[in-house]
Amino acid sequence: MEPKEKNLDENLEEITSTPEVKPKSKFNPKILIFGLPLFVLQLIVVYFITANILIKKMDGRTPEKTATEAVAESPAEAEEEDTTMNHFGEYIFQIEDIIVNPAYTKGEQLLLSSVAFDVPTEVTRKELEKKQILVKDMIISILSSKTINQLSNVTYKDTLRVEITNKLQSSFSEMKINRVYFSKYIIN
């Protein structure tokens, strides 16, 4: 019976003994070799998508036409598109030094601002010059209706730009405004 007992003892030892567990390595070189270049590639792709597509859409521009689209259009269509295309930054009308008392400040605080309008044509710029008093009054009424908290909020400037553009375009329906700029914006 000794051989059977030895076999039983060996079997019992095998069952009761815990297998050796190899400690897992925390650093895997495959992650570094493949993961890092893949991550850098993703960053580059996101940069180009943002720079070439999203920013142009936010500016109101569309990405350049493909070669097949450019060949397909006739010369007459190309001329018509060129005359109606907005020329950003080419025609600027500016109103200097608008001083406003923000709402609920009782005259204790002031906003000093200069506003510029980017318009598509020289005709529109001259039209704004003729209506400068009306434009200035609209800007003053918009700015003076805002609280100091609204005016001091950096992101609220975009809302002001949109509001000023909408007010001008609703008052002068024939006028097109490309963009509104604040060249001076000081709260005291």
Image (spheres, rainbow, N blue to C red):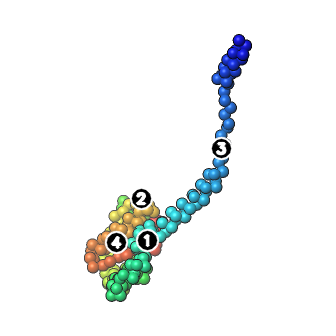
Q: Is mark 1 on a helix, strand or loop?
A: helix
Badges 4 and 3: C-beta atoms under 8 Å apart? Answer: no
The picture quadrant where one finds residue 96 is bottom left
Question: Which quadrant of the figure contains the N terminus?
Answer: top right
Residue on which disc 2 sits: 149
Q: What element carries label 4?
A: helix
Q: What residue type is labelled 2?
A: Asn
Residue at coordinates 31% horizontally, 81% vertically from top-left?
A: 131
Badges 2 and 1: C-beta atoms under 8 Å apart? Answer: no
Q: Is residue 31 above or below residue 68?
A: above
Q: Which amino acid does label 1 sit on?
A: Lys
Discs 3/1, front: 3
Q: In the rendering, which numbered label is found on residue 26?
A: 3
Marks 4 and 1, the one that precedes in the sequence: 1
Residue on which disc 1 sits: 56
Give the x, y percent position of residue 63.
42, 73
